[in-house]
Amino acid sequence: MTVWLDFEKPVLELEQRIQELKEQATAQGLGAGDELAELERKAEALRREIFSHLTAYQRVQLARHPRRPYALDYIERCFSGFAELHGDRHFADDPAIVAGAAMFRERAVMVVGQQKGRDTKENLLRRFGMPNPEGYRKALRLMRTAERFAMPIVTLVDTPGAYPGLGAEERGQAEAIAYNLREMAKLRVPIVTAVIGEGGSGGALAIAVADVVILFENSVYSVISPEGCASILWRDGKKNVLAAEALKLTAADLVRLEVVDEVLPEPFGGAHRDPAAAAATLGDALGRHLDRLSGVSPDGLVEARLQRYRRMGVFREESA
């Protein structure tokens, strides 16, 4: 896949020129040291200029980047022995949610992730990572299995939101999400959630009621998409850039508002530029938080989790 975002293209053109020059120099046995060094300096300066001053909507674009690592990419790199499990035991399996048992650094865990597709066929199968009710019911079924066997739970969030189709509504989409919120709050095992791309509305929260929520620096987490917000508030989806700023959906905003607990740095230019490095960062963060949570009693986990969500949105007024 060769899709790149508009603001990435100036850097990409320079990088392609550098690669061409290297190949020509190698093929012809010539030196191009000075020219290469100058181009590499320009590319590095351009990267820093672009990626150090991203707008909120540019972060949204990076979170949606078609080359960005998805849940299965992180599962492959961070876990071993992943055994995918299927079905909600009520209606069907949902390919938009992948879940199963795996080993993480000599610890058995249950992994649940939202999975987008890499091409048109796979995106139609997985509905661009938008789960049906049976996906959320499958996720909860496996989380309860994890609780039964005292296995920590890791969830990987990457969805524009729950699937809004007629069939999903007929099968109880809202009820499935609400039920997950309530039941996850009561699970007596550690839960760590990582927002690896888009964290969209209740569709994300349905697998994200956790003891710890971590987020990659170019991921977003919001009650609605910028386009949806713009359509509702201004009746104009083209005001998505303005909506992205107003929603406070970037990593910096979410940490300040205490919605997430930690921001994970990405390779410069985004996780898609070095998926292996992004996976290593995620693995280290998961290990650190799971180690800490393993020392907390089940009652302590549930109480701390409830308090974590009760604190959100609380504010106080003070006189001057």
Image: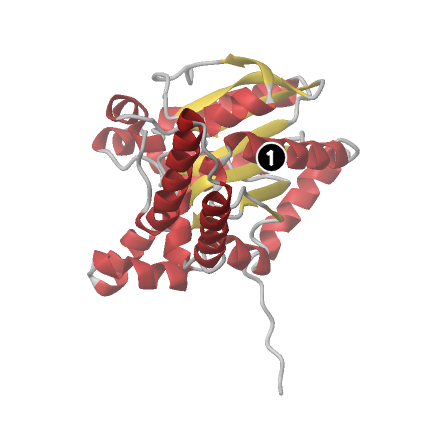
Q: Give the camera-side residue of 38 and 145.
A: 38
Q: How is the image coloured?
A: secondary structure
| Image coordinates for residue 216, horizontal then vertical, percent | 53, 44
Kind of residue sitting beneath label 1: Leu
Q: Is residue 209 visible?
A: yes
Residue underneath mark 1: 282
Q: Is residue 218 left or right of residue 169?
A: right
Q: Quadrant of the C terminus?
A: bottom right
Q: Quadrant of the N terminus?
A: top left
Quarter location, residue 64: top left
Relative to 84, is 50 above or below? Answer: below
Give the structural element (helix, strand or loop) at label 1.
helix
| Image coordinates for residue 46, horizontal then vertical, percent | 44, 54
Q: Give the camera-side residue of 318 and 47.
A: 47
Residue under the point 25% across and 25% down: 124
Quarter location, residue 209: top right
Residue under the point 33% across and 26% down: 118
Q: Is residue 205 left or right of residue 255?
A: left
Relative to 164, is 146 above or below? Answer: above
| Image coordinates for residue 154, horizontal then vertical, percent | 58, 29
Q: Is residue 33 left or right of residue 228?
A: right
Q: Give the camera-side residue of 177 and 26.
A: 26
Relative to 92, is 220 above or below? Answer: below
| Image coordinates for residue 258, horizontal then vertical, percent | 59, 56
Residue under the point 53% across and 48% down: 217
Q: Is residue 206 visible?
A: no
Q: Give the camera-side residue of 169 and 264.
A: 264
